[in-house]
Structure formats: C-alpha cells, structure tokens
Amino acid sequence: MKELNYSDPAYNEAMSHYLAGDWSTAEPRFVELCAKYEKSTFVRLILGNIYYSLGKLDAAIEKYQEAVFVDPDFGLAYYQLGVCFYRKGHLNRALEAFRMVAGTKQNHAMASYYIGLINMYLGKDEQAAEGFRSFKEQSPESMIANLYLGQLKLKVKDYKGALGPLLELVERTPQFAEVHYMLGTVYFGMHDNTRAVQCFRRALQINPEDERSKAKLTLLTDMQFT
C-alpha cells in the first residue's frame, strides 16, 4: 500500500479544488487518490469531508470509517463520524464516535460538547453535565457550556450550583435576556427576591415580550403586598 505523496500533481490539483470549495470537481479526483493511496487516512478524511459537504452522509461515514480502520487513533475522523451520525439522528452511534475522540491524541473540544448535548437530549443529566464540564475545561473561552450547566442545575433546583456558571455567563453576555431570566429564577429559588426582581426586569428590558419574566414579576409584586 502506497503512502501519500504530497508532491503528486494529481493530489495538488485535487486539493486546489477542495480548498476552493469546488466539491463536485474535487470528488472524482479524491476517489482516484483513495484507490491510488490505499494507506492514506488523510485522503479518506478529505473525501469524507467532500461527501459531507455534498450532503452524502452515508458515503462520508464510509470514508471516515475506512480512515479509523487504517488508523484507530485518528481522532479527527472519529469526530467527523460522530457529526455525521448526529445529523442522521443516530445518537447512540454518535456518542460512541465522540467518546472515541477523547481516547486519541487528537482530542477535540467539540466532541465533549456533543457528548453533553446528546446526553441532555437522552435525559442523562449527569453524563450531560460531565460532557459540558469537560468542554468548559478544554475551551474556557466558550460560554455555551455555562448555559447548559445552568439549565441542568435549575432542572434539579440546585440553585447554588447554577449561580456560578450563570453569573460568569451574564458577565460575558450582558444582552442575553435568557440568562437574566434564569438568574432571576435562581435568586427566586434562593429567596433573594430583591435580586430576582432586578433580573426579571433586566430580562424584560432586553426582551419586552418575555411573558415568563412578566409572570414572575407579577408574582413577586403580589407577594410584597400580601
């Protein structure tokens, strides 16, 4: 089996079409390269990406599977495989692929994000929280994990647990009305009605159509006068 020759004119021409986003022209050229370089996981990864871009998910899956068969430590191919299964709605197979990413040298932060998201869909909250925490550790600049961690804590009425992630999130995204609503719910659950009112009012300033915040404010106002 031949290793990929990066000086091969056929490879360079195929890559030029791929990098230009000319998927239809690149596709047959990479099919030929796969036949020529039977040991190249990279060529299979790129052909899988082309199929994915063309909406041919089954063909993409086949190429990614070929890549990890040749190199079981090919984390990026596992990640792409997981995305394909996720798009097809095969959540358990997607989870399996994303978990394989973590065991390779090419770990991908978004794999942990998908692990959290899929487990959240499946109602496996502890596994979901673990996935989002892992994503947060690998990608601390991203705030999406804070949102989901806050939601998971609120779901079980762990208000103190939800407070930290949401305060960090609101500091970074002060115009995100949903976070102010969630913080209001946290403070209401902690019996800090003054801060709860402030949060619900801020949520309404940003999103005046938020009926949930209106209802909570009405409830808190009625409580103050009873």
Image (spheres, grey):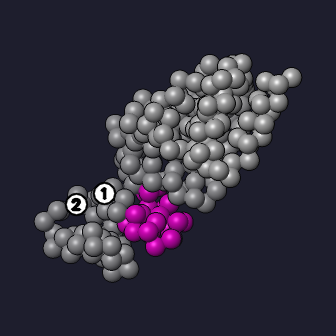
Three-letter code for the amino acid on which mark 1 is drawn = Phe
The residue at the point 65 percent across, 50 percent down is 208
Q: In the structure shown, which secondary structural element does the residue marked by tag 2 occupy?
A: loop
Residue that lies at the very extreme toward the bottom in this rendered image? 25
From the top left corner, tell me how far across and down residue 76 is, in percent. 38, 49
From the top left corner, tell me how far across and down residue 108 is, in percent. 40, 42
The residue carrying mark 1 is 42
Residue that lies at the very extreme toward the front in this rendered image? 225
The residue at the point 46 percent across, 73 percent down is 54
From the top left corner, tell me how far across and down residue 140 is, in percent. 39, 33
Query: Which one is nearer the viewer's eye here, 45 or 109?
Result: 109
Residues at marks 1 and 2 touching, judged by CB atoms closer than 8 Å: yes
Three-letter code for the amino acid on which mark 2 is drawn = Leu
Residue 56 forms part of the magenta stretch: yes
Residue 131 forms part of the magenta stretch: no
Query: Which one is nearer the viewer's eye here, 139 or 36?
Result: 139
From the top left corner, tell me how far across and down residue 156 is, in percent. 72, 26
Q: Is residue 32 visible?
A: no
**Among the two numbered marks 1 and 2 on one chain, the one whose residue lies closer to the N terminus:** 2
Distance (Cα) linking label 1 and label 2: 8 Å
Residue that lies at the very extreme toward the right in this rendered image? 226
Identify whether 153 is placed above or below 213: above
> As drawn, is 76 to the left or to the right of 118?
left
> As drawn, is 152 to the left or to the right of 146?
right
Label 1: how many Cα within 10 Å (few below 14, some 14–19, many 20+): some
The quadrant in which the C terminus is found is: top right
Task: Give the magenta-colored segment's residue range.
Answer: 47-66
Q: Which of the two discs, 1 and 2, sits closer to the camera? A: 1
The residue at the point 31 percent across, 57 percent down is 42
The residue carrying mark 2 is 4
